[in-house]
């Protein structure tokens, strides 16, 4: 009788662990999708309304409302990139969702924002955004 109880207990622990891991992966992917959906709303502003010359003009005028909005866009990308780099979000899912949009379509605009911001300060306030672009471009292929 004791062996059956021990076997049943070990099996229950295994099933509970398996269930936990499946739920963890599912929730991580769900969080990734939700975060990317929120980021898309911010990125749409950058994609739809601003060309490179407008961005450069607005970023150079630190007192304008557009400067604040573009800085906020860059901050949102940075926050997302931090979570990707720290593997809070599922990297495979991020690549599947964002490849072609962040690293191709918006790369020039994001890089322009980063370059202008770097030229104004000796601090690099957005290292994870640069990492995200590099990671998507070179290090991760499905």
Image: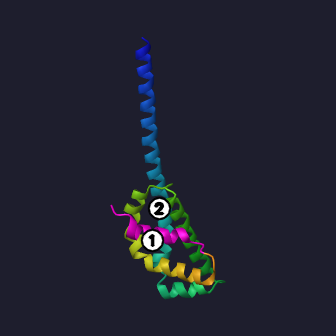
Q: Which residue is mark 2?
A: 36
Real-space Cα separation, disc 2 to disc 1, in angstroms = 15 Å
| Sooner in the amino-acid sequence: mark 2 or mark 1 | 2
Main SS, magenta residues: helix
SS at circle 2? helix
* Residue 135: in magenta span: yes
The circle drawn on residue 133 is 1
- Of residues 69 and 124, which is closer to you in this image? 124
- Of residues 139 and 61, which is closer to you in this image? 139
Number of residues whose C-alpha sits closer than 10 Å to that of mark 2, classed few (under 14), some (14–19) or many (20 or more) = many
Please name the residue shown 46% across and 29% down the image: 13
Which x, y percent locates residue 66? 59, 80
Left or right placement of residue 108 versus residue 69 in this view? left
The residue at the far top in this view is: 1
- Of residues 41 and 140, which is closer to you in this image? 140
Quarter-of-image position of residue 82: bottom right
Please name the residue shown 38% across and 63% down the image: 140
Please name the residue shown 45% across and 76% down the image: 47
Which x, y percent locates residue 113? 53, 79
Which residues fall within the magenta stretch?
124-142
């Amino acid at each position: 009788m004791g062996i059956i109880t021990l076997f049943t207990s070990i099996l229950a622990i295994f099933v509970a662990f398996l269930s936990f891991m499946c739920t963890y992966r599912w929730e991580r992917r769900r969080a990734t999708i939700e975060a990317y959906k929120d980021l898309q709303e911010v990125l749409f502003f950058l994609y739809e309304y601003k060309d490179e010359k407008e961005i450069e003009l607005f970023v150079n005028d630190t007192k304008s409302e557009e400067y604040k909005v573009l800085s906020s866009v860059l901050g949102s990308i940075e926050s997302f990139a931090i979570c990707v780099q720290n593997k809070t979000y599922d990297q495979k899912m991020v690549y599947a969702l964002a490849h072609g949009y962040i690293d191709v379509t918006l790369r020039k605009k994001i890089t322009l924002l980063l370059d202008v911001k770097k030229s104004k300060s000796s601090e690099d306030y957005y290292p994870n955004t640069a990492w995200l672009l590099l990671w998507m471009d070179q290090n991760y292929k499905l």
